[in-house]
Image: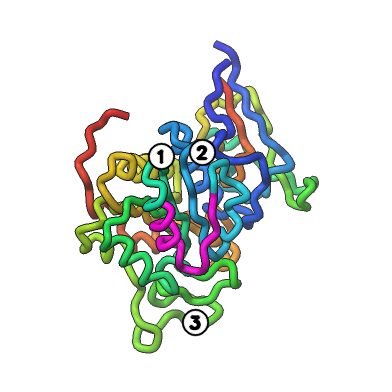
């Protein structure tokens, strides 16, 4: 089975942290040391290989910044 | 590889102006996805209201009209009567629908206008920086109720869905929430059903969606989702208040 892939659009992300709170694997973190075009801290996935592609982060994202493939 | 989650064609590729963590973005997406799945995007006309969602006509890929404060159901009535073959929805907040627009929403429901109303209730005036709304909970602190809402001075919150359910013209009334994954999936079903009730010509449909306002509630977004689950649902219980019998075709 191919590895799930999750893509975060850094410029759409507002760093609200809702995806961080719902990820069952706790893989998502807010990048405190980086700013995007909006001047907000975007999120990133630390260990992509542990992502199961469940899509919970994308479902709760208010800004459609996340796309998931499996 | 198959897409589990992709950007919907019902929303234009424009970043929204909402604050970080605001659930308006989720509700926009659910409406857009429902329009695409029911294949009515090309013949849907939305009516945006006044409040934080004043310019959501910029975001939806369907035709949109901007209505005066609280008058979205009246504008939608006109559009639907002139174009009965179109699907017409309004997108209103609690400051718009439950305050200045109370007369319009009640009479649109009483007349049984065949429109769908999506009502985002976050218990506060978000756009004008957090004043007390008619839907503000008892004891909730806002900029105009700094010691908490006192029912003796400011009255009680309005439960719009329960009120609408007393009108025979309102055939589908449901209250849903967006505070976690499971409830977002349920909210999506409610949004779809509202469009299907309208497509079937059954009458007026209203979906009340419990939303958050992290900025004006003074909480971070995950905490405001918890506040909806723990506090707001006590005042606004989720549920189906009027249920038309739809055959499960789609």
For the point 62% across and 23% down, the residue is: A5
Residue at screen point 52% across, 32% down: A55
Subunit that carries the residue with mark 2: A
Q: Which mark is residue A59?
A: 2
Instruction: Determine the CA span between mark 1 and mark 3.
Output: 34 Å
* Pointer 3 chain: B
Q: What chain letter is assigned to the residue under label 1? A: B
Horizontal and vertical percent position of residue B169: 24, 57
At horizontal 59% and vertical 43% (from top left) the residue drawn is A20
Callout 2 environment at 10 Å: few (<14), some (14 to 19), or many (20+)? many
| Quadrant (top left, top right, bottom left, bottom right) of the N terminus of chain B | top right
Q: Which mark is residue B185?
A: 1
Co-location on one chain, circles 1 and 3: yes
Determine whether, in the image, residue B70 is placed left or right of residue B195. right
How many angstroms separate mark 2 from mark 3 (CA)? 34 Å
The percent position of residue B125, horizontal first and vertical second, equals: 52, 70
Q: Secondary structure at mark 3?
A: loop
Q: Secondary structure at mark 1?
A: helix
Q: Quadrant of residue B77?
A: bottom left
Q: Pick the residue in front: A14 or B53.
A: B53
């Amino acid at each position: 089975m191919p590895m799930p892939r999750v893509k975060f659009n850094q410029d759409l992300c507002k760093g609200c942290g809702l995806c961080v709170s719902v990820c069952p694997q706790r893989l998502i973190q807010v990048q405190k040391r980086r700013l995007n075009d909006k001047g907000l801290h975007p999120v990133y996935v630390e260990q992509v290989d542990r992502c199961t592609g469940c899509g919970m982060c994308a479902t709760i994202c208010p800004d459609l910044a996340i796309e998931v493939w499996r | 590889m198959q897409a589990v989650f992709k950007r919907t064609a019902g929303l234009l590729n424009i970043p929204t102006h909402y604050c970080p963590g605001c659930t308006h973005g989720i509700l926009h997406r659910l409406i857009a996805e429902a329009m695409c799945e029911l294949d009515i995007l090309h013949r849907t006309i939305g009516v945006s209201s006044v409040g934080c969602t004043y310019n959501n006509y910029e975001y939806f890929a369907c035709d949109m009209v901007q209505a005066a404060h609280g008058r979205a159901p009246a504008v939608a009535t006109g559009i639907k009567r002139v174009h009965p073959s179109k699907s017409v929805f309004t997108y209103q907040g609690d400051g718009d629908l439950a305050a200045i627009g109370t007369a319009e929403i009640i009479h649109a429901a009483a007349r049984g206008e065949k429109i769908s109303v999506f009502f985002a209730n976050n218990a506060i005036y978000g756009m004008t920086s957090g004043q007390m709304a008619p839907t503000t909970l008892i004891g909730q602190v806002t900029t105009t109720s700094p010691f908490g809402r006192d029912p003796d001075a400011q009255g009680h919150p309005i439960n719009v869905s329960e009120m609408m359910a007393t009108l025979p013209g309102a055939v589908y009334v449901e209250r849903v929430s967006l505070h976690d994954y499971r409830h977002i999936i349920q909210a999506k079903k409610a949004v779809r059903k509202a469009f299907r009730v309208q497509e079937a010509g059954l009458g007026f449909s209203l979906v009340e969606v419990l939303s958050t306002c992290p900025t004006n509630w003074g909480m971070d977004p995950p905490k405001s989702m918890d506040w909806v689950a723990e506090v707001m649902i006590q005042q606004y219980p989720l549920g189906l208040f009027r249920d038309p019998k739809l055959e499960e075709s789609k």
